[in-house]
Amino acid sequence: MYSIDPARVLGLEEGDAHVIRNAGGRVSDALRSIIISQQLLGTREIVIVHHTNCGMLTFTDESIRDKIRADLHQNVDHIAFLPFGDLEQSVRDDIKILKDSPLILDVPITGYFYEVETGKIVQVEER
């Protein structure tokens, strides 16, 4: 599993982009931040970047809930941890969520994944 520095990977300098990070890069978890970015900071393009060897590919909602129940004795059935089994599809799903949301401005939205093994950025085509 890796933790990626998106600014470094994308060659961004301070102030070039508003980078929003979360586990798995899932947009449904970042929607509030994206709305604020558009409405208050003037963001007019969205780029989604996931990466290979992501920890979110290694578990299911059920398995993490079971672990939390066992380790912390807490019920987290109400939390969607948003794991995924298909990296490219997760990017497509996130693009669709944003494009379908009435809270997101009509701006360019593209999706990529970063290959940690090669350092390449690969665009994910919508279907």
Image: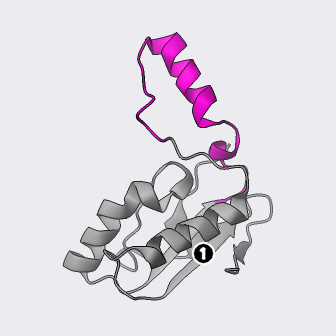
Horizontal side of residue 27 vs 120, given as left or right: left
Relative to 5, residue 92 above or below: below
Q: Which residues are magenta?
A: 51-80
Q: Residue furthest right?
A: 118
Residue 30, quarter of the rendered image: bottom left
Q: Position of residue 44 (x, y in %)?
A: 36, 87
Q: Position of residue 32 (x, y in %)?
A: 30, 61
Callout 1: helix, strand or loop? strand
Horizontal side of residue 32 vs 101, given as left or right: left
Residue corresponding to mark 1 = 111
**Which amino acid type corresponds to the residue marked 1 in the rendered image?**
Gly
Residue located 44% across and 11% down the image: 73
Indicate whether residue 73 is drawn in magenta: yes
Horizontal side of residue 33 vs 23, given as left or right: left
Residue located 31% across and 74% down the image: 103
Q: Quadrant of the C terminus?
A: bottom right
Residue located 74% across and 63% down the image: 115
Q: Position of residue 40 (x, y in %)?
A: 19, 76
